[in-house]
Image (cartoon, grey):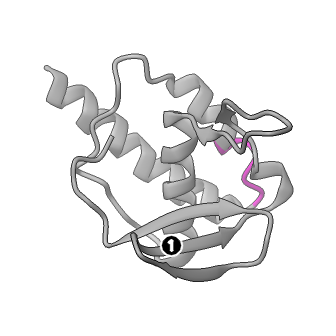
Amino acid sequence: MIDQIPRTIHGVSLERTRTLKTSLGVVEIHHIRDELFTGFDGLSPTEAGVASPEKALFDTAYLLSTRSGGWSLPEVELPDNFNSTKLCTFLDLVLSKRVRRIMHDGLGLVLRESAASKG
């Protein structure tokens, strides 16, 4: 959904927050609450799974909203099968009204910009 190559790869985990330096680059693992650790495709007892596009956008918005307040992601291109209803189900899991409001505003902007770019 993002064409740019990031300097740092971010992931979410139930483990505590930490930074790993690998030969491929820096990986930052961010702790999230148990209730937010959902929305992965391919998850099985032997496979870790990968976040769905909706969950990946949610996680990005969550991390940005808990650190800095207002934010935007103008470079994001959402896939044609992106499900904004699924995105909203994740948003409902956020307990903090402040963080949920910041996320709602930022995600609304991302959805509008994505729709406008598709014409």
82 on left or right of 92: left
The answer to whether residue 93 is magenta is yes
Which quadrant holds the C terminus?
A: top left
Residue 44's place in the image compared with 61, above or below, is above
x, y (%) of residue 49?
66, 39
Residue underneath mark 1: 27
x, y (%) of residue 53?
49, 35
The answer to whether residue 66 is magenta is no
108 on left or right of 10: left
* Residue at 61% from the left image edge and 71% from the top image edge: 29
x, y (%) of residue 76?
28, 44
x, y (%) of residue 96?
73, 62
| Mark 1, secondary structure of its residue | strand
Residue 54's place in the image compared with 109, above or below, is above
* Residue at 58% from the left image edge and 41% from the top image edge: 55
Residue 106's place in the image compared with 8, above or below, is above
66 on left or right of 73: right
Q: What is the span of residues highlighted in magenta in the rendered image?
A: 91-95
Please name whichever residue, 7 or 32, is drawn nearer the observer in this view of the structure. 7
Which quadrant holds the N terminus?
A: top left
Residue 86 quadrant: top right
Please name whichever residue, 112 or 13, is drawn nearer the observer in this view of the structure. 13
Residue 17 quadrant: bottom right
Dominant secondary structure of the magenta stretch?
Answer: loop
Please name whichever residue, 110 or 21, is drawn nearer the observer in this view of the structure. 21
74 on left or right of 81: left
